[in-house]
Image (cartoon, rainbow, N blue to C red):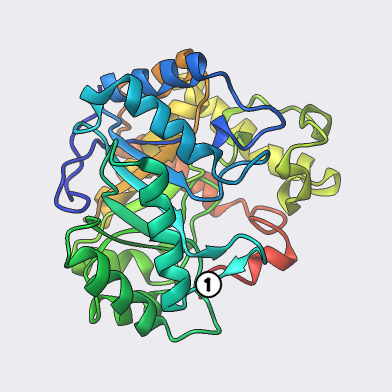
Amino acid sequence: MVAIAKSPVANRQVGDLGFGTMNFTWRPTNLPDEEAFAAMNAALERGANFFVSGEFYGTQDPQDNLRLLNRYFTKYPENAKKVVLSVKGGVNMKLHRPDGSPEGIRTSIDNILEKLDGKVKLDVFCIARVDPTNPVEQTWKTVKEEYIDTGKIGGLCLSEVKAETLKKAVSVCPVSVLEVEVSLWATEIFENGLVEVCAEHNIPIAAYSPLGRGFLTGQLKSPDDIPDSDMRKRFDRFQPENFGKNLELVESIKKIAEKKGVTPAQLALAWVVQKGQEYNVSIIPIFGATKESQVIENLEETSLTKEEMAEIDAVLKSFKPIGGRYNAQMERTLYQ
């Protein structure tokens, strides 16, 4: 069971760990409902009630993830009030680029609400990336005045923004949560001022890819372990010339995990949670396991001593990941 996070999301309590649903539909073939529902139930039963989805989380159809949620809450209506749901949007899905115009934001939120069909509340609408072609203040104002103030949604989330943007946002609209990649090999928020802004304004952080897209679990031994259709094939850190060097971090973490008697995944998730505690802010790892057994394993209660945290931090200081978190084209959309 996970503990209750210190900072609520959209005025609702969530667990220390959250659950990402993207991997159910971001794959060559969608996971069968029976398997997806079992994983979702396992997460919810163990306290990971903060679910994160996206309007464009589907390889066959961008909106397959929303349809999956609709079917889940149709089958389990009693769980709708237990889940705190964040859905990422604000993207022109025809042009595959951010759209922060008032019209684009309305289209996105209205579509999400339509696909959910009242089965579950949209607690948080998350703007996936900053749209450089539209004034961000107008984007936030549209969300606040037309959707939050009217009670259609619960709150606003910003994803991958820089500290200055977040500061500007809170003067326009309350920010319920910041979404950003945080893990043992994605520690930028502790260096770029974001964690301090979140602590100042009591904004929890939804840490996506807390297991390094599976890399930090130790299950990947070589680039050949990644299927050709997998999006990680396009990301710098998974390229053959970088893979072996980055694997050195995994080997170091595995040794610490083995000494403690936990899995590398459990260690990595606990580190993210406790790193937030050092900065007096809730950092909620959003892991995306698709198997019920993986969910149960990840949600085993794990805590690290000060000495273990220091040992891990020492490893991180001596290691710099090779390659960007995404690739050159996608990196330009980060921290805007």
Tag 1 residue:
99
Q: Residues within 10 Å of mark 1 (few under 14, many from 20)?
A: many
Q: Position of residue 190 (x, y in %)?
A: 41, 62
Tell me the amino acid under the disc marked 1. Answer: Asp
Left or right: 169 as drawn, with respect to 286 = left
Q: Position of residue 266 (x, y in %)?
A: 43, 27
Q: Quadrant of residue 326?
A: bottom right
Q: Residue at x 40, y 33 (%)?
A: 70
Q: Secondary structure at mark 1?
A: loop
Q: How many marks?
A: 1
Query: Which of the two residues, 103 or 41, is positioned nearer the viewer here?
Result: 103
Q: Position of residue 9 (x, y in %)?
A: 22, 50
Q: Quadrant of residue 1?
A: top left
Q: Is residue 211 visible?
A: no
**On screen, residue 270 above or below 171:** above
Query: Which of the two residues, 87 or 230, is positioned nearer the viewer here?
Result: 87
**On screen, residue 89 above or below 80:** below
Q: Position of residue 288 (x, y in %)?
A: 49, 33
Left or right: 33 as drawn, with respect to 153 = right
Q: Residue at x 76, y 32 (%)?
A: 226
**On screen, residue 211 above or below 197:** above
Q: Is residue 291 visible?
A: yes
Left or right: 28 as drawn, with respect to 8 = right
